[in-house]
């Protein structure tokens, strides 16, 4: 199974209430009984539109390169291609934690590490944004994903920015 599909599966399991990326890190006990769903891991277009100007929100577009944003993106989004979180395409393990933190901080997430703010990830169709979500959770950020992603956003009346 490709790595992005595997990460998406892990996200779906966390959404359904099974252990997420923070559980192993914190030593949390597995849930007893039936798992409880976690809808707070998702944001809607309405929620995102209402919070676009929230200074405690970091929106990450999972674009391969900044030029990808020229086709249009959610206002305020920073570009973070999920493969840039790995050692290399041939060595698909996460970069060291300190380097991952530096990457997220460069994109504005430093101010949000302990404020209760959110890192929201999205991509074109909602598949690859799972990786950035997973790493944000791993680093201790409050993270959520916009699952309908730009596929929905770009077809709505919501604002779209295109970089020249």
Image (tube, grey):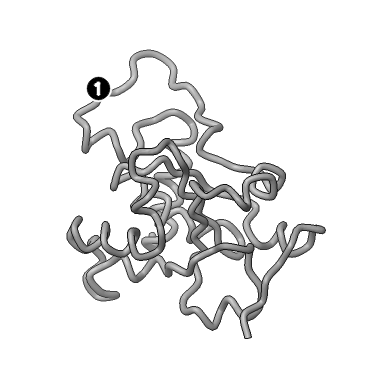
Q: How many marks?
A: 1
> Residue 138 at what x, y percent from top left?
30, 46
Residue 30: where, in percent of width, then height? 29, 23
Q: Is residue 26 left or right of residue 21?
A: left
Which quadrant of the rendered structure holds the N terminus?
Answer: bottom left
Viewer-side residue, 111 vs 31: 111
Pick out the residue farthest to the top. Answer: 33
Left or right of residue 131: residue 52: right
Q: Pick out the residue farthest to the bottom.
A: 164
Horizontal side of 92 relative to 112 (left or right) equals left
Q: Which residue bears the numbered disc 1?
A: 29
Toward which corner of the image does residue 35 lie, by quadrant?
top left
Residue sitting at x 33%, y 70%: 84
Which residue sits at x=78%, y=62%? 155
The answer to which image quadrant residue 131 occupies is bottom left
**SS class, disc 1:** loop
The location of residue 127, given as percent across then percent down, is: 52, 58
Q: Quadrant of the C terminus?
A: bottom right
12 lies above or below 108: above
At a point 57% along the width and 62% down the height, the residue shown is 76
* Nearer to me, 4 or 40: 40
């Amino acid at each position: 199974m490709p790595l992005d599909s595997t990460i998406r599966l892990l996200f779906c399991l966390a959404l359904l209430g099974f252990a997420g990326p923070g559980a192993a890190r914190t030593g949390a006990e597995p849930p007893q009984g039936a798992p409880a769903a976690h809808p707070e891991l998702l944001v809607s277009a309405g929620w995102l539109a209402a919070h676009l100007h929230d200074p405690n929100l970091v929106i990450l577009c999972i674009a391969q390169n900044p030029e990808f944003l020229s086709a249009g993106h959610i206002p305020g989004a920073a570009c973070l291609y999920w493969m840039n979180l790995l050692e290399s395409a041939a060595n698909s393990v996460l970069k060291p934690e300190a380097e991952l933190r530096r990457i997220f901080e460069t994109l504005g997430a430093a101010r949000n590490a302990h404020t209760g703010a959110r890192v929201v990830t999205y991509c074109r169709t909602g598949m690859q944004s799972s990786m950035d979500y997973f790493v944000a959770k791993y680093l201790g950020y409050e993270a959520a994903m916009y699952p309908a992603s730009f596929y929905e956003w770009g077809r709505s009346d919501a604002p779209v920015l295109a970089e020249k």
